[in-house]
Image: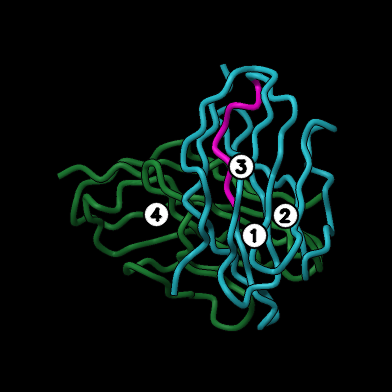
Amino acid sequence: DAGVIQSPRHEVTEMGQEVTLRCKPISGHNSLFWYRQTMMRGLELLIYFNNNVPIDDSGMPEDRFSAKMPNASFSTLKIQPSEPRDSAVYFCASSSAGGPVDTQYFGPGTRLTVL
Amino acid sequence: AQSVAQPEDQVNVAEGNPLTVKCTYSVSGNPYLFWYVQYPNRGLQFLLKYITGDNLVKGSYGFEAEFNKSQTSFHLKKPSALVSDSALYFCAVRIGDTDKLIFGTGTRLQVFP
């Protein structure tokens, strides 16, 4: 089975530009998570969805960040406008509700650099 | 407040020696604990988890973890380290009845030949 797929793997953009990160969860998984990893703050949960519905977006840094999950096989994280401090590795993870405590499986990440 | 701590930024061990990567937690209710490993320029890979039952949990790549309720610890162990085990290791705890995980700050394991 294919794991979590993220695109692009690397993104370099200039401050003020719009950035869209994409994620395809593992087929059959019904929960999806967006994380950000930086040296300073470690691994932070930004938002997560269950059955395509946003459940908790308390980790989204500010209004410049938005996430959508239009269907069970696709999600986007958008930053508009981007700023240098958004430079980080963004991970998507998915899990299924098949047991009492679900395991999250991570994608390879998107390394974002905002100049 | 629920939290997880990894007290060591880096652990160095010689190949063939046993290794331990430490993790302590603070949760209300039953603790659900995870270990993940991250290799350079890769995503996090699941190693093992504790839900309930046997305090010794076996996982991938020969790793195991020991749950100790009285010490609120969940240390990762391996009897004989390999150079290829060198990576960043994260402990995580589930928050309450949600699907959210809190991750520790990570411990870099360096195995020397």
Give me the chain that's cyan: A
Reply above or below: A109 against B55.
above
Q: Name the residue under label 1.
A: B72
Badge 2: chain ID: B
> Which of disc 2 and disc 1 is earlier in sequence?
2
Badge 4: chain ID: B
Give me the chain that's green: B
**Horizontal and vertical percent for residue B53?**
60, 83
Q: What stretch is highlighted in magenta?
A: A85-92
Mark 3 or mark 2, whichever is nearer to me:
3
Q: Which amino acid does label 1 sit on?
A: Thr
Residue lying farthest to the left in this orientation: B113
Q: Which amino acid does label 4 sit on?
A: Thr
Q: Name the residue under label 3.
A: A43
Query: Crowdedness of circle 4 by 10 Å Cα count: few (<14), some, many (20+)?
Result: some
Residue at (50, 43) in percent of width and height: A8
Tags 3 and 4 both on a single chain: no
Badge 1: chain ID: B
Residue at (64, 46) in percent of width and height: A35
Residue at (55, 52) in percent of width and height: B23
**Horizontal and vertical percent for residue A91?**
57, 48
Instruction: Decide if residue A11 is on the left or right side of residue B64.
Output: right
In reply to whether residue A86 is colored magenta, the answer given is yes
Q: Name the residue under label 4.
A: B20
Mark 1 or mark 3, whichever is nearer to me:
3
**Horizontal and vertical percent for residue A83?**
68, 20
Tags 1 and 2 both on a single chain: yes
Query: Crowdedness of circle 3 by 10 Å Cα count: few (<14), some, many (20+)?
Result: many
Q: Name the residue under label 2.
A: B26
